[in-house]
Image: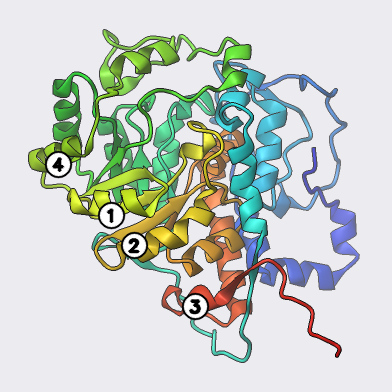
Amino acid sequence: MRLAMIPMTTCRSSSTHSSAFIENPLYEATSNLESKRGRETVTSRNNPPPPPLLEVEPSLLINESAESAAHPDAMKIVPGSDATPLNVLEFEEYAREYLPKSTMDYFASGSDSMETLKENREAFKRLVLHPRVLRDVSKMDISTTLLGHRIRSPVCVAPSSTHRMAHPDGEIASTSAAAKADTCFVLSTMSTTTLEDVATASSAANTNALRWFQLYVFKDRKITVGLVRRAEKAGYKAIVLTVDAPVLGNREADVRNHFSIPKRLTMANFGPQNATTDYADYVSDLYDQTLSWKDVEWLKSITNLPIVAKGILTPEDAVMAVESGCEGVLVSNHGARQLDGVAATIDALPAIVQAVGDRAEVYMDGGVRRGTDVFKALALGARAVFVGRPVLFGLAHSGEAGVSSVLRILNAELKHAMLFSGTASLADIGPAHVRRGLPPLPSLL
């Protein structure tokens, strides 16, 4: 596992290194991470525990909390592995090494051959930045608005289920981190914490915190109506309707692992009388394959909350969403967990932005691991970018502190990209700042 550990003796020998560490915003994003990790200290499933370092730069280490509780599922934490990840990819490496295999596979895998899962990342690599120089970037501002609500950053938290499989504090930790970062948090219907408890934690962390509720329209419309009413009462500001899940995708890793939700957890928003550990069967019984655009209009008729359609990949469906009353469109392929072989979301984004115009806000998720990825999505017209797996990986690392660090890192990297590109605010970022592929070599003739 590649995590940076720097001996104190090395740092003491170079005052230049120490100064650079303090001044670099990318290092600053990770230097204050405090662990509140629930864990048991056990040996990694792949490697024996490494010997502890005697002298390590304190700002790179997680400060162990005396309040840490043992993880109920014996999360694999190795002594000496406490160096703070410097980027989101290192959080993922950490989670892959120390989470139970079936849990990590559930979080990280895609459907079928997982080609779209790979493509979500590769598509970003095909976009090259086109920076401009000698621009005044002395006053940096990455704030934006979502459906009229101002947030401090365009890096938002996407809905994902079962956060408590990553850490005992689960959605409480994730929403608290998002609230303190003053960004949008979207709670999954299939959360392992009730929407009311999440709302309470969110408001406790930030009274102005923006939270949305992700929703499925179920066969039993009474369930759907009940969830909407509860979300309204709990102060959620929008309904994010998932439209790309008539059934669960064919996730072969879950089949191979005989995956099921741990018995200690339930789908908290449905109560113990409905919840089951057989996740695939449970959601299959709930999902409605007759869902159509008329049901979106029906949903619009039962609530005054704005509707965001999540799972749009074509300009035609984006137009249908707007015409059905949606105020937002979330370009998403469900983390490549549904239909394999579809477009990467960053590739689908520009045509959808063009089709929607100014009739609705457009967001995207999928494959975002760097601040430069966020920059590229903003340049192609996304108003905000939602991250799901990185939040789970940060959560697995150190609970709320890990999620906070993931968000800080992405924001710091975004600011770095903006500084180098000559853009002081999100309004300055546009299509001229990205190119597809490397520019052709000039002719020598």
The dot on residue 319 is 1
Q: Mark 2 points at which residue?
A: 355
Cβ atoms under marks 2 and 4 closer than 8 Å: no
Cβ atoms under marks 1 and 2 closer than 8 Å: yes
Q: Position of residue 105 (x, y in %)?
A: 62, 25
Q: Mark 3 points at which residue?
A: 140
Q: Mark 4 points at which residue?
A: 297
Q: Which of marks 2 and 4 is in front?
A: 2
Q: What residue type is labelled 2?
A: Ala
The first of marks 2 and 4 along the sequence is 4
User: Is residue 227 something one can see in this rendering?
Assistant: yes
Q: What residue type is labelled 3?
A: Met
The first of marks 1 and 4 along the sequence is 4
Gap in angstroms between the C-alphas marked 3 and 1: 34 Å
Gap in angstroms between the C-alphas marked 1 and 4: 14 Å
The first of marks 3 and 2 along the sequence is 3
The answer to whether residue 242 is left or right of residue 55 is left
Gap in angstroms between the C-alphas marked 3 and 4: 40 Å
Q: Which amino acid does label 1 sit on?
A: Val
Q: Which of marks 3 and 4 is in front?
A: 4
Q: Which amino acid does label 4 sit on?
A: Glu
Gap in angstroms between the C-alphas marked 1 and 2: 7 Å
Q: Position of residue 27 (x, y in %)?
A: 68, 61
Q: Where is residue 399 in the image (x, y as percent from the top left)?
A: 53, 36
